[in-house]
Amino acid sequence: MRALAAGLLALTLALPALADWAFTDAEAVSGEPQAKLFPHLESAGRGNLAASGDRLAVVWEDNRDGSPQVYVALRALDRPGFAAPLRLSAGREAYEPVVVGLDAGRFLAAFEQDGKVVARVFSAAAQGALTQLDAAVSAQITLTAIGKRIHAAWGRRDGRFLRLVSAPLTVDGLQIRSGAARAVDLSPAQDEQLYASLAATSKGYAIAWEDRRAGHTRLLTATSSDGAQWSTPQPLNEIPHSSSAAELGLGRGPGVTRVSLAGDGAATVAAVWMDKRDFLSGYDTYAAVSTDHGASFGANEKAQDAFGAEKPQWHPAVAVTPHGVVAAWDDPRDDTPDIWLSTRHSEKEWSDDFTVTGAAGPGSQDNPVLLWHGGRLHLAWVHKGADGAQVRYAQGRWE
């Protein structure tokens, strides 16, 4: 009898869950697949998607011109089909672009070019001049915007370390002006501060980043009403007190990396990251949610379901929607990397994982990015197949 019950339970768990999101067919963003093309969606905060007016923009980096350069493709929000990619960078090499929407179909993109962070305003009709935001060696820029408020954060080289700084940006037409860049953490630089992510709230800004001053990587958060002065950094990831990798001689700390934030523009801010506290199966996707503008976060929650427990999860992204927080990542539970998503319907309660047509199956699908805008959940990712690689896109609606 016990064996029968266990079998019925296993059968029930194996049945596919009905997803609450319905997605359109996948579209090519970066053009037709190309052999030896290597597109990347690996920017700080995973901010590669933005909307403005009736347009959607996707930014990425690839080597189609013989060296790593930054590109954008634009699409109407309400009908399929991306325009041909436009190159935004103009240096020897460029990496890790992010983008935010401004108004009337204008966008602001920022990225690392030749060892400095730069920004450019663009639309379907025009591009502004590239503006250097920092004279020092700098990298890993992230952006957030809400209304006319635009803020940037990046890593500035300070001796041996990248030190996190932030600055307000002002856009007038196609021109960019940067305010003074100030340190997010006022304590002396002790080790690397890496891959920040920003979210705008109704009371200012929330920020999260990787911090290595403790001898291992921790995730820290802070808030600011104006971006000029930040609160004392607070820990985001919990460090389990039970048997750990460190106790087994496998390293210090639980192993965390690549935090991303998203908000609803009001009081809710959600964070996702890669976390190796269950170290024998590699990274898992963990999340935490703040309902007080990022001042404090709730308990750490594992976003993926039990079927992904034996495989590592990579490249988590997050969006805050009226239907719950949505996390996306890639993992190889079906033998090749696929894009998986999960929705947080209530406190600590995440849905079964689900996939999107065109973002799972033959080949490799990885590096998802998410955006909630206009009543739609926008998803882009990198596809690698027998014909080569390309950036792809689909949008979902709640059903």
Image (spheres, grey):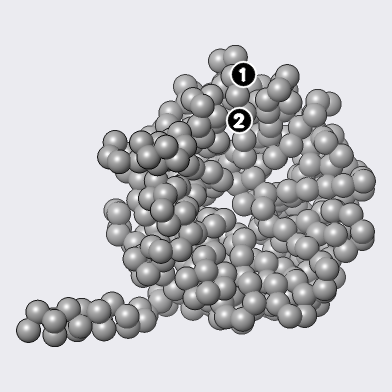
Residue bearing mark 2: 193
Circle 1 — which element? loop
Write the residue at 87% across / 47% down: 93
Rounded to the nearest angstrom, the CA distance separating label 2 from label 1 is: 9 Å
Q: Is residue 222 left or right of residue 301?
A: right
Give amino acid for label 1: Ala
- For the residue pair 71 and 2, the one nearer the viewer reads as 2
Question: Dot 2: within a 10 Å radius of its alpha carbon, few (fewer than 14), some, or many (20 or more) residues?
Answer: many
Q: Amino acid at mark 2?
A: Gln
Element assignment for label 2: strand
| Disc 2 and disc 1 in contact, CB within 8 angstroms | yes
Q: Residue 165: which quarter of the image?
A: top right
Taking depth in this image into account, of 198 and 374 the one nearest to the observer is 198
Question: Which residue is denoted by mark 1 in the rendering?
Answer: 189
Q: Nearer the viewer, residue 276 or 174?
A: 276
Which of the 4 image quarters holds residue 377?
Answer: bottom right
Where is residue 144 shown, x and y percent of the image? Answer: 62, 43
Question: Residue 298: in sight, yes or no?
Answer: no
* Rendering coords of residue 51 (x, y %): 66, 59
Asked whether the viewer can see residue 384, the reply is yes
Residue 38: x, y in percent?
78, 63
Nearer the observer, 207 or 67: 67
